[in-house]
Image (tube, rainbow, N blue to C red):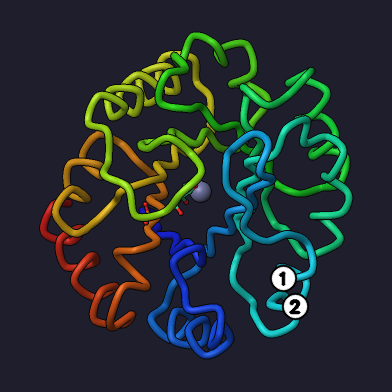
Amino acid sequence: MFQIAPSILAADFNCLGKQLQEVEKADVRVLHLDVMDGVFVPSISFGMPVIASIRKESNLFFDVHLMVQNPIRYIKDFVKAGADSITVHSEACDDIASTIQEIKCFGVKTGLAINPETPVDAIKPYLPMVDMVLVMSVHPGFGGQKLIPETLKKIEELYQIREESNLCYNIEVDGGVNAQNISEIVSLGTDIAVAGTAVFGGDISANLEKIREVVADAS
Ligand code: DX5
Ligand code: ZN
């Protein structure tokens, strides 16, 4: 079933707990957590302590998106902090297979992300190993950007490969998702769409309701 995963990058950190309660009340199941290291991407966001702190109050599925260079170094720490799923960037790993293996060893779900300029072909050998593929629809590093339409063809490509090769990864799309473009994103075969600004910008429950209405009309 299609899921919308709010990204807390766009939340008001001064009242994060309250905003997360609102998200949970609106029947959201997946929370997207954007970790940025200032090396793989220009910006720095938050790390293990913030995730560990909200883990104490939340039963949501924690979808941790590591925009971190050489992420194998931190897998254990993010599992300890409460991640249910860890997604690493193919462009950031010295050894993609070992990094995925490391995540699997800790018993959490594995995700592999590709930047807008990275083709699906670059990660094809790893598709049988992962639970999720994250298609970046903006250049990673900042919330509130405009979706790059050319990236959406990778959703169809991943959908086709999954059908043809009998694989079972979920397809996640991240960046610039809003009520205006979500029906196209869903119709192409997306399983999980991340939305930061479109959820946390303004009235959270009204924003989620609007997105859900559009999705329901499209399916
Ligand atoms: C970008 C992050 C995204 C982003 C989504 O580097 O991975 O998750 O925060 O935010 P919006 O929906 O505002 O583009
Ligand atoms: Zn993200």
Label 1 secondary element = helix
- Label 1: few (<14), some or many (≥20) within 10 Å? few
The picture places residue 149, in percent across and down from the top left corner, at 22, 31
Q: Tell me the residue at 33%/80% (across/down).
A: 204
The picture places residue 97, in percent across and down from the top left corner, at 77, 20
Query: Amino acid under label 2?
Result: Ser
What is the total number of numbered labels drawn onto the structure image?
A: 2
In the rendered structure, the answer to whether residue 124 lies left or right of residue 178 reads right
Q: Tell me the residue at 51%/27% (across/down).
A: 114
* Picture quadrant of residue 74: top right
In the rendered structure, the answer to whether residue 104 lies left or right of residue 125 reads right
Q: Which mark is residue 53?
A: 2
The picture places residue 11, in percent across and down from the top left corner, at 47, 73
Q: In the rendered image of this protein, does residue 159 appear above or below residue 136?
A: above
Q: Tell me the residue at 48%/84% (across/down).
A: 19
Label 2 secondary element = helix
In the rendered structure, the answer to whether residue 52 lies left or right of residue 111 reads right
Q: Which mark is residue 180?
A: none
Residue carrying label 1:
50
In the rendered structure, the answer to whether residue 97 lies left or right of residue 16 reads right
- Label 2: few (<14), some or many (≥20) within 10 Å? few
Q: In the rendered image of this protein, does residue 135 appear above or below residue 126?
A: below
Q: Tell me the residue at 83%/34% (across/down).
A: 72
The picture places residue 67, in percent across and down from the top left corner, at 63, 41
Label 2 to label 1, Cα distance in Å? Answer: 5 Å
Ligand 1 closer than 8 Å to the CB at disc 2?
Answer: no
Query: Amino acid under label 1?
Result: Val
Q: Are marks 2 and 1 in contact (CB under 8 Å)?
A: yes
In the rendered image, which quarter contains the N terminus? bottom left
